[in-house]
Image: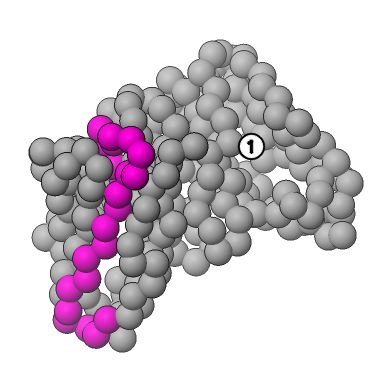
Amino acid sequence: GQQVMQIPQYQHVQEGEDFTTYCNSSTTLSNIQWYKQRPGGHPVFLIQLVKSGEVKKQKRLTFQFGEAKKNSSLHITATQTTDVGTYFCAGPLGFNKFYFGSGTKLNVKP
Amino acid sequence: GAVVSQHPSRVICKSGTSVKIECRSLDFQATTMFWYRQFPKQSLMLMATSNEGSKATYEQGVEKDKFLINHASLTLSTLTVTSAHPEDSSFYICSAVRGLGTEAFFGQGTRLTVV
């Protein structure tokens, strides 16, 4: 079965506050990907992390890959209403298969 | 990014009938396509992995005779929900990748309602 877990399930923040979602795998991942799904939309690729301990930034978004390559996090600094959506991590488990975490739904109050 | 087109976006069908959903990669050749199912407020559950020219690999608990997958070319995969029942109502979404470990490009999804 799928073994990528993500917390929290929901997060409500005030605009300007920070937000973090965590992803944990029971097995070592060769890489991890992050996707954002807006309400009513389809998942859109954000980033891929490959190296142990890797940190990547995209403007206000900071992505980290754990040293053991079993966990990852996405941190958003100073959230905006445009950040609303569900954030999924996805790990390849097996030959080119992707399993998605349960997702974290972010709601930002203006 | 690359474009994946999924059709139809919405379909309503009667119980017992079959529905075909198409997934096309428009500007690249997809070595592998994936089919997911998403229930309201839940994550994407991988149903099957589709490789061009070979049989699809189904996840545990997914009925291969009910969810027929055909990957006829490097740009087209189809999912047919056979003898649909109301419990098959869901959001089905495909994704395609160019190669091993690369980012997945998603179709727009198909909202299936079985009445």
Q: Is residue B30 magenta?
A: yes
What range is drawn magenta here? Answer: B13-37
Q: Amino acid at mark 1?
A: Tyr
The residue at 22%/58% (across/down) is B79
Relative to the observer, which residue lies in front, A6 or B103? B103
Side of B97 relative to B70 (left or right): right
Determine the chain carrying the residue at label 1: A
Look at 33% across and 62% down and name the residue there: B7
Residue B57 at least partly seen: no
Position of residue A60 relative to residue B82, above or below, is above
**Mark 1: secondary structure:** strand
User: Residue B107: image x %, image y %?
Assistant: 40, 52
Horizontal and vertical percent for residue A20? 73, 39
Give the residue displayed 51% in from the left and 18% down from the top. A50
Q: Label 1, on which residue?
A: A22
Is B7 left, or right, of A68 in this rendering? left
Residue A107: image quadrant is: bottom right
